[in-house]
């Protein structure tokens, strides 16, 4: 019966597929017991199955057959990424898959690498965040912290930002972000890419500021480089010196252990005078058994001078 519930949800999503990426099954939301370890994403024309616990080949083969029946001619290949085993390469379960493909969301192009061992370069749950950035970035100077492959930066430039500064420790990811801007024919003179561990020095960012908007979307935990409970307060304390009066902050947390109250608590403690303008989640494709879990995005504005 559990398998029926899973297949019914996938079938329902398949009826409304478009040529844009989307989440087909969000097991991490714990809405169907027994499949909390399973995530299925559509990166047209490829389906990516992500496992956080190993699965039997028989289950994967049955799932593959249902996907093939439902998606028919739209489907080029099915890829399995086993994240319970970091040393294991992604596996093409059926069909073919390019090492690098371009997906389009709301008219913007992004490079995705489905055969990557870990993150593929694009987070479908952050669609609402990218939409928000696109809507409010006009004429703003933007600082994009933990930039990853610069999805927010692409959205900001498309929304009319006058400048975006992307900061991430990983220079290779920033180069990937540069390619994302190229895919959208953006003027790279408006965009900078800085490989920097901001916890070693916020001074460089202060020299580049002040900024009218700062985007903060760190991983929940990244070895010893970032731990949410330890490092969010460090960021929060520096925000007033990085922002203009009335500067805006978009902050995001996505972690099973942290609910929206974590972010709310950070602002109450460190920026109590900031005004919350918007609160977003990932949307209908990312149902959560506990509405406090999953992705939470908070949009604040500092009090003016």
Image: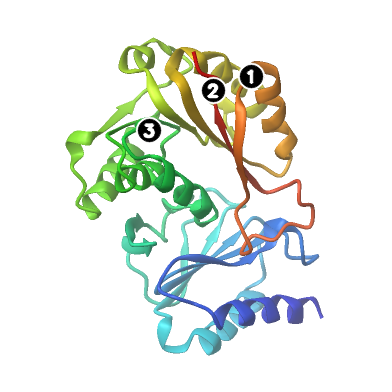
The residue closer to the viewer here, 172 or 211, is: 211
For the point 48% across and 47% down, the residue is 132
Could you tell me if the residues under marks 2 and 1 are in contact, i.e. CB atoms within 8 Å? Answer: yes
Which residue in the structure is indicated by mark 3? 170
Sequence-earlier tag: 1 or 3: 3
For the point 60% across and 54% down, the residue is 282
Q: Indicate which label's residue lies in the foreground, 2 or 3.
A: 2
For the point 76% across and 51% down, the residue is 291
Sequence-earlier tag: 2 or 3: 3
The residue closer to the viewer here, 18 or 210, is: 210
Sequence-earlier tag: 2 or 1: 1
Which residue in the structure is indicated by mark 2? 302
Which residue in the structure is indicated by mark 1? 273
Image: 172 above or below 64: above
**Residue 192 visible in image:** yes
The secondary structure type at the circle numbered 2 is: loop
Q: Position of residue 269 (x, y in %)?
A: 70, 18
Q: Position of residue 141 (x, y in %)?
A: 33, 29
- Structural crowding at the residue carrying mark 1, measured as other residues with C-alpha within 10 Å and reported as few (<14), some (14–19) or many (≥20): some
For the point 43% across and 72% down, the residue is 46
Quadrant into which the N terminus falls: bottom right
Which of the 4 image quarters holds residue 267?
A: top right
- Give the Cα separation between the discs numbered 1 and 3: 34 Å
């Amino acid at each position: 019966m559990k398998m029926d519930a899973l297949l019914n949800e996938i079938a329902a999503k398949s009826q409304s597929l478009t040529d844009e990426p989307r989440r087909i099954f969000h097991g991490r939301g714990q809405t169907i017991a027994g499949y909390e370890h399973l995530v299925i994403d559509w990166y047209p024309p490829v389906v990516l199955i992500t496992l956080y616990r190993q699965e039997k080949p028989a289950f994967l083969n049955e799932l593959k057959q249902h996907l093939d029946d439902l998606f028919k001619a739209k489907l080029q290949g099915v890829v399995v990424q086993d994240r319970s085993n970091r040393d294991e390469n992604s596996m093409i379960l059926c069909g073919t898959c390019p090492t690098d493909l371009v997906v389009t969301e709301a008219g913007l192009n992004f490079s995705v690498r489905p055969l990557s061992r870990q993150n593929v370069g694009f987070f479908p749950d952050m669609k609402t965040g990218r939409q928000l950035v696109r809507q409010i970035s006009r004429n703003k100077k933007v600082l994009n912290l933990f930039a990853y492959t610069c999805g927010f930066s692409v959205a900001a430039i498309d929304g009319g930002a006058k400048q975006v500064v992307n900061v991430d420790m990983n220079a290779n990811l920033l180069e990937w972000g540069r390619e994302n801007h190229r895919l959208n024919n953006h003027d790279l003179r408006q965009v900078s890419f800085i490989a920097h561990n901001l916890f070693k020095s916020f001074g460089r960012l202060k020299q580049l500021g002040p900024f009218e908007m700062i985007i903060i979307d760190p991983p929940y935990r990244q070895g010893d480089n970032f731990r949410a409970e330890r490092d969010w307060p460090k960021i929060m304390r520096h925000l007033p010196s990085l922002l203009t009066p009335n500067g805006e902050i978009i902050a995001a947390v996505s972690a099973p252990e942290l609910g929206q109250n974590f972010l709310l608590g950070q602002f109450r403690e460190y920026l109590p005078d900031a005004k919350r303008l918007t609160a977003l989640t990932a949307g209908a494709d990312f149902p959560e058994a506990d509405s406090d879990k999953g992705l939470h995005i908070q949009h604040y504005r500092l009090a003016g001078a």
